[in-house]
């Protein structure tokens, strides 16, 4: 999903050298080194990850191999070749216990609750420890074209059910890949100081609030009921409040991303066009 958005938003004149399974496995250090030697890129974006949050609970070793060791392979190879690297991470590195209306900054203490969060945090540390120029960008609640996402799931379920229950005790910032991807390109062009950055659409809501706005903007009529995380019985614990502060990003780039409600409106309009084709 993010890869598609990165591809379509690549700046004019940028040639993309894409690597994905089965052609390139980031767990294979030698394969990564060969790809860098053959392509000789000016920068690398690592958007690869084991993202099945609940699946990570029972497959933590596999998730660690991708999210930590794999990220480390890419970072080490990039550092050795003198290639800057941009790595994607997640709000799940936090425990979500920050008081309302707080937001997590880049230097706030991390305390992941889930296997997914632990493996992504290990990946952050592997990238930072490789010693090369890098940017670690934490984001959250992604949706966009060419991938399963919350917006599409809500609209599908609304067509199948009369009542829909959505959790109202998890808060974050819905983020469109079609906003995030151009921002990542901007980072590579402007080259801010290396390190950690948070990048999300501005504003925040609960998953229930996100669903309500999806249905409001799309004109979908459905009875929406609020529930809590415990009622769902999901294997992986989620942070209750993991809103990310974008202050560092805005200062570094001279601006951030638009409101999540505006991003949703643009996505729904584009989604409607795509479905009509």
Image (cartoon, rainbow, N blue to C red):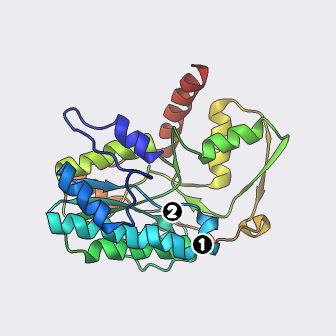
How many C-alpha atoms fall within 10 Å of the one at disc 1: few (<14), some, or many (≥20)? some
Q: Secondary structure at mark 2?
A: loop
| Disc 1 to disc 2: CB gap under 8 Å | yes
Which residue bears the numbered disc 1? 59
Viewer-closest of 36 and 269:
36
Does 42 sit above or below residue 52? above
Does 257 sit above or below residue 117? above
Q: Looking at the rendered structure, which numbered label has been put on residue 51? A: none
- Percent coordinates x, y for residue 247 in the rendering: 33, 60
Does 115 sit above or below residue 38? below
Image quarter in which the C terminus is found: top right
Q: Secondary structure at mark 1?
A: loop
Report whether 79 appears left or right of 154: left
The residue positioned 49% from the left and 45% from the top of the image is 260
The residue positioned 20% from the left and 60% from the top of the image is 84
Which residue bears the numbered disc 2? 50
- Percent coordinates x, y for residue 267 in the rendering: 51, 34
Report whether 238 appears left or right of 112: right
Task: Give the mark nearer the N terminus: 1 vs 2.
Answer: 2
- Percent coordinates x, y for residue 94 in the rendering: 49, 73
- Residue 222 in sight: yes
Viewer-closest of 85 and 33:
33
- Residue 99 in sight: no
- Percent coordinates x, y for residue 153 in the rendering: 67, 44
How far, Cα to Cα, is label 1 from label 2? 10 Å
Viewer-closest of 126 and 99:
126
For residue 113, which quarter of the picture? bottom right
Going by the picture, which residue comes out furthest to the left? 82
The residue positioned 76% from the left and 68% from the top of the image is 233
For residue 58, which quarter of the picture? bottom right
């Amino acid at each position: 999903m993010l890869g598609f958005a990165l591809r379509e938003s690549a700046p004019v004149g940028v040639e993309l050298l894409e690597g994905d399974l089965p052609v390139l496995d980031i767990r294979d250090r030698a394969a990564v080194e060969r790809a860098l030697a053959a392509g000789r890129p000016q920068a690398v974006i690592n958007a690869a990850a084991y993202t099945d949050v609940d699946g990570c609970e029972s497959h933590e070793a596999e998730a660690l191999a991708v999210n930590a060791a794999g990220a480390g392979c890419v970072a080490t190879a990039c550092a050795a070749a003198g290639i800057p690297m941009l790595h994607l991470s997640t709000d799940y590195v936090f425990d979500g216990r920050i008081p309302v209306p707080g937001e997590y900054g880049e230097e706030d203490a991390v305390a992941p609750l889930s296997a997914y969060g632990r493996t992504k945090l290990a990946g952050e540390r592997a990238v930072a420890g490789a010693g090369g120029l890098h940017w670690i960008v934490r984001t959250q609640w992604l949706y966009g074209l060419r991938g399963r996402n919350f917006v599409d799931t809500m609209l599908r379920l609304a067509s199948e059910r009369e009542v829909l229950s959505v959790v109202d005790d998890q808060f974050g910032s819905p983020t469109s890949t079609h906003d995030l991807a151009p921002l990542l390109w901007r980072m590579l062009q402007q080259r801010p100081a290396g390190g950690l950055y948070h990048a999300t659409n501005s504003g925040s809501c609960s998953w229930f609030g996100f669903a309500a706005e999806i249905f409001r903007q799309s004109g979908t009529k459905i009875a929406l009921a609020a529930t809590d995380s415990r009622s769902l019985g999901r294997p992986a614990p989620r942070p209750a409040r993991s809103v990310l502060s974008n202050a560092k990003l805005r200062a570094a780039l001279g601006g951030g991303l638009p409101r999540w409600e505006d991003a949703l409106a643009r996505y729904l309009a584009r989604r409607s066009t795509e479905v009509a084709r």
